[in-house]
Image: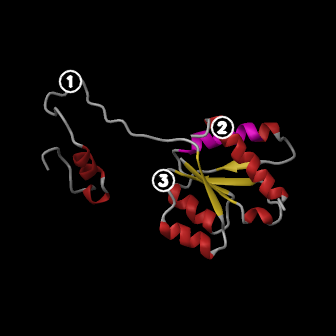
Amino acid sequence: MVSHKQTNIQLIVKYLAIFTGLSLLNACSLTQATSTLRQPITIDGSSTVYPITEKVVADFNQENQGKLQATAGFSGTGGGFRKFCAGEIDITNASRPITKKEMAACKNANIAYIELPIAFDALTVAVNKQNNWADHVTVQELKTMWQPTAQRNINTWKH
């Protein structure tokens, strides 16, 4: 049997799919859906996914005026998963796959979920035209520069 909550969550996921053309990760709780209807439908997580979700929520709220509302926040991917696995939100946005630790937290809380890719984000590395000293940078060098251990340790291109 499909509860009202589950149907409503499916509705907002449908809006996400239509808006983005279905192509980052959203996890949608189906276990929570069997509980009583909670207003509004709550979405939180990745700040990079937030602009998409914000637009979808605005359209959803406009179309469902007075019947059902949704909210969107951006506590970051990890923050979203923590809230989601604690049963505090209905949908989480993520800019990476769910980790094994997060999977276990959801399982321990009896939170079943589905993952729906809705968008992909990317990083572009550009070189200023006036650059006259760097003729190439490898993916490994970029990884070395941007890994957490590089913070405050790698400060120049020579290091």
Specify the segment rendered in magenta: 49-60
* Residue toward you, 130 or 118: 118
Q: Residues within 10 Å of mark 1 (few under 14, many from 20)?
A: few
CA gap between label 2 and label 3 equals 21 Å
Residue 112 placement (x, y as % from top left): 66, 66
Considering only order in the chain, which callout, 1 or 2, is on the residue closer to the N terminus?
A: 2
Which mark's residue is nearer the viewer, 2 or 1? 2
Reply yes or no: does residue 13 show up in magenta.
no
- Identified by mark 2, the residue type is Lys
- Magenta-drawn stretch, dominant element (helix, strand or loop): helix
Q: Provide residue 132's location: percent of width, then percent of height.
A: 14, 27
Q: Residue at x 79, y 37 (%)?
A: 62
Q: Residue at x 66, y 41 (%)?
A: 17
Amino acid on which the number 1 mark rests in the picture: Gln
Q: Toward the viewer: 29 or 75?
A: 29
Identify which residue is drawn at 78% across, 48% down: 69
The residue that label 1 is drawn on is: 130
* Residue at the image position 77 percent from the left and 41 percent from the top: 61
Q: Residue 8 placed where, x, y %? A: 79, 51
Q: Secondary structure at mark 1?
A: loop
- Residue 108 percent coordinates (x, y): 61, 76
Labelled disc at residue 96: 3
- Secondary structure of the residue carrying tag 3 is loop
Asked if 22 appears above or below 30 in the picture, the reply is above
The amino acid beneath tag 3 is Arg
Q: Earlier in the sequence, mark 1 or mark 3?
A: 3
Q: Is residue 98 left or right of residue 21?
A: left
Specify few, some or many for label 2: CA neighbours under 10 Å numbering under 14, 14-19, or 20 or more: some
